[in-house]
Image: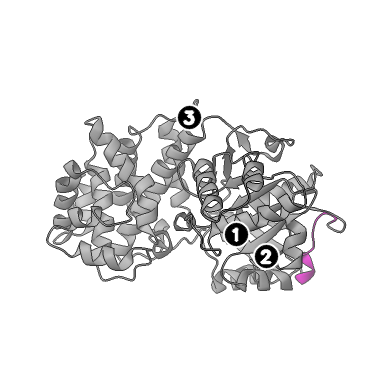
Amino acid sequence: MTSSALISPYQRDGRSIGVIHFGLGAFHRGHQAVYFNDALQNDLGEWGIYGISPRSSQVTDLLRQQNFIYTVNARAGSKQDPKIVSSLFGGSLFDIENSELRYAATSDELKIITITVTEKAYISGTDRNSMPNRLLDLLLLRFQAELPTPTLISCDNLPNNGAFLREKIFESAAVRYLAPSFQEWLTNMATPNSMVDRIVPAITPEAIERFSSEYGYRDNSLISTEPYRQWVVAPHESPYDLSQLDIEISSEVEQYEQLKLRLFNGAHSTTAYFSQLSNIEFVFQAMQLPIWEAFVSRLQQQIGKSFIPPTGINVDDYSETARIRISNSAVLHRSAQIAMDGSAKLPQRLFRTLNQLARENLPRERVAFAIALWISFLRSGLSIVDPLVEELMTRSRGKNPVAEVMQTPGLRDPIVDSEWDLVDRFVRELEVQKPIEIAKNL
């Protein structure tokens, strides 16, 4: 197989943009873009994507060299399933004057705008470079062209992400004093909550070289991921049927969010901080330790009592699947990558979990230990990437680290003060014991 393998499996010429995606990172290319690729390949309508990179042109520059066609290689153990994805019809840095972007924004076939940025990007205000304001600038183009509102779907790990996105957009429109007629037009816009799930780690040069050697062609935009994928969207008024794209339409998105954020992401983050403190590079390596894998199972048992699962979902089965996914040795997900931005991720993954268990007076010591691992990570001197990094590191090294960290300005949904002593106990134990020694007895 040669580089000619990077050819679209379906005709793209003459097709229209049906999707704009904001945040052209690996996750979108390994998740939503695959759904739209399947729809195009199955001739289910116009689902071509125009991708926007918010900060750097590196991704679009690489993709452009390959005509925005790339490979998604789903891997589990020794099994590989590479697939050519060509649903990205173009892309660029965000520039409202870019003619290609303006053309995409005013496409008659534009159905939805999807977003994968980070939890910290949801900031309203007057900053024209913020995500909500850039979305407003795109929507203004459609309004001025007298076109209907698209559906906006946040695909970020935030509870009630659609409602939260809508709130930030309307707040920004108000403080910018945008025309009342435009703000009225915006009220017609659907912003359903959604939940997305797939492990898509950052690709490495080594993975690209290995793939090139095995398959006979080089793909500098290669995506390596797991076979598992899920996308759940709340019911909403729309002229098209997303369920035809293998997207689940469910009124229980909140329950699916809690299922995933707590049982999968909560276990994933906990394993990442354990790995960082134990000098383990990849999370699958931690899950190969029988003591740690057993602890994660027991942790999930406590977490599973903190919410009501979606109808028909067996929590024990879901937990086991989550552990298998984290243990996938073919998906090289670095613990340092998962450990990033803990202050933005842990409120919905662990803090709310502990608070709910405390309200119901249910066992919660394993969840407290998971949070203590994060605070010990802040105290460790290891490299930390977090929007609140300086404040968190300073507070974590204070006399009362848990209390001080939980009172950090800007930290959302901190654990309630009745639980500070429990978490602090584990922070003190981690000063003199290895994490795995404590986990063994929990």
Marks 1 and 3, how far apart at CA? 34 Å
Q: Earlier in the sequence, mark 1 or mark 2?
A: 2
Coordinates of residue 291 in the picture (x, y in percent): 28, 50
Q: Quadrant of the C terminus?
A: top left
Q: Residue flagged by tag 3: what amino acid is it?
A: Pro
Name which quarter of the figure residue 176 lies in.
Answer: bottom right
Marks 1 and 2, how far apart at CA? 8 Å
| Residue named by callout 3 | 310
Marks 2 and 3, how far apart at CA? 41 Å
Circle 3 crowding by C-alpha within 10 Å: few under 14, some 14–19, many from 20: some
- 439 with respect to 353 (left or right): left
Q: Which mark is residue 134?
A: 1
Q: Residue flagged by tag 2: what amino acid is it?
A: Ile
Q: For the point 32% across and 36% down, which residue is it?
A: 301
Coordinates of residue 62 in the picture (x, y in percent): 67, 72
Please report contact status of discs 2 and 3: CB closer than 8 Å, yes or no.
no
Q: Earlier in the sequence, mark 1 or mark 3?
A: 1
Dot 2 falls on a residue whose secondary structure is loop
106, 255: nearer the viewer? 106
Q: Which mark is residue 96?
A: 2
Please report contact status of discs 1 and 2: CB closer than 8 Å, yes or no.
yes
Magenta residues span: 2-11
Q: Main secondary structure of the magenta part?
A: loop
Please report contact status of discs 1 and 3: CB closer than 8 Å, yes or no.
no
Dot 1 falls on a residue whose secondary structure is helix
Q: Earlier in the sequence, mark 2 or mark 3?
A: 2
- 150 with respect to 7 (left or right): left
Name the residue at the top extreme.
Answer: 311
Q: Is residue 87 magenta?
A: no
Q: Residue flagged by tag 1: what amino acid is it?
A: Arg
